[in-house]
Image (cartoon, grey):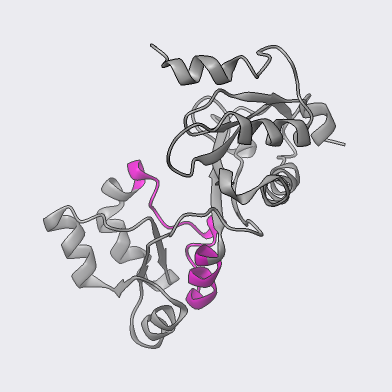
Amino acid sequence: MKRGKKYKEVSKLVEATKLYDVNEAIDLLGKTATAKFDETVEAHIRLGVDSRHADQQVRGAVVLPHGTGKKVRVLAIAKGEKAEEAEKAGADYVGAEELIAKIQKENWFEFDVVVATPDMMGLIGRIGRVLGPKGLMPNPKAGTVAMDIAKAVTDIKAGKIEYRLDKTNIVHVPVGKVSFGSEKLNENFQTLMSALIKAKPQASKGQYLKSVVLSNTMGPGIKINPSKLAE
């Protein structure tokens, strides 16, 4: 992959083999952000689990204290009182059959998260094949299937993120924007790591946090010492 001049310049600030402590890594994120837009900060965490086994899955959600800095568009699938609650809580789109049909017929995806009440899951099953690959399928573990749909919407708007393993046992999640500054980014990151450590499956043996990398949108990855995070 060909890298630009700016990337090569900022890469000199980061030692490729060094394991940084969190504060040092977060400070470096600000120095390696050179884009004209507010870059997103992402965490990439490789876990010592095997996602092929059901008892070693790691999936859940956590509300970041300072949010992600991104406006999240919420689609709520609900009826009656629950639809009204979702609307009052700030859902961008609320409905049932008509919105399912819109997704099916018009390939409509102008939303980032789908929440639903449990009784709507049969209806949502009709579009599971298109929601699943996009990571949009509501799930009780992520708090996106709930009777208290107002809380589900409020939490997402407040900065709730979902974490889950990819096929290589890595969790990729945003933890804020470069403009947040070191303190807020640190608090968001520590909140995420606490949630991941609590989510450690009992079946996981050996080192749980294999590697932890922070990066901004256009900059190099900065490796963090995982042993210090597990203390």
In the shown orientation, is residue 29 left or right of residue 202?
A: left
Residue 137 position in % (x across, y down):
39, 53
Q: Nearer the viewer, residue 215 or 100?
A: 215
Residue 173 position in % (x across, y down):
55, 41
Residue 3 in the image: above or below residue 62: above
Dividing the picture into quadrants, the one containing residue 26 is top right
Residue 32 position in % (x across, y down):
58, 28
Is residue 212 at all visible to an observer of this figure?
yes
Is residue 222 found inside the magenta-colored segment of the image?
no
Q: Nearer the viewer, residue 225 or 153?
A: 225
Q: Residue at x 62, y 31 (%)?
A: 31
- Outermost residue on the bottom side: it is 81
Residue 25 in the image: above or below residue 117: above
Q: Residue at x 58, y 57 (%)?
A: 67
Residue 188 in the image: above or below residue 7: below
| Total numbered labels placed on residues in the image | 0
Q: Nearer the viewer, residue 163 or 91?
A: 91
Q: Quadrant of the N terminus?
A: top left
Dividing the picture into quadrants, the one containing residue 105 is bottom left
Q: Nearer the viewer, residue 210 or 222?
A: 222
Residue 18 position in % (x across, y down):
74, 16
Q: Residue at x 32, y 50 (%)?
A: 131
Is residue 177 at all visible to an observer of this figure?
no
In the shown orientation, is residue 49 left or right of residue 22?
A: left
- Outermost residue on the right side: it is 231
Q: Quadrant of the C terminus?
A: top right
In the shown orientation, is residue 92 left or right of residue 183?
A: left
Is residue 149 found inside the magenta-colored segment of the image?
yes
Q: Which residues are magenta?
A: 132-157
In the shown orientation, is residue 99 left or right of residue 147?
A: left
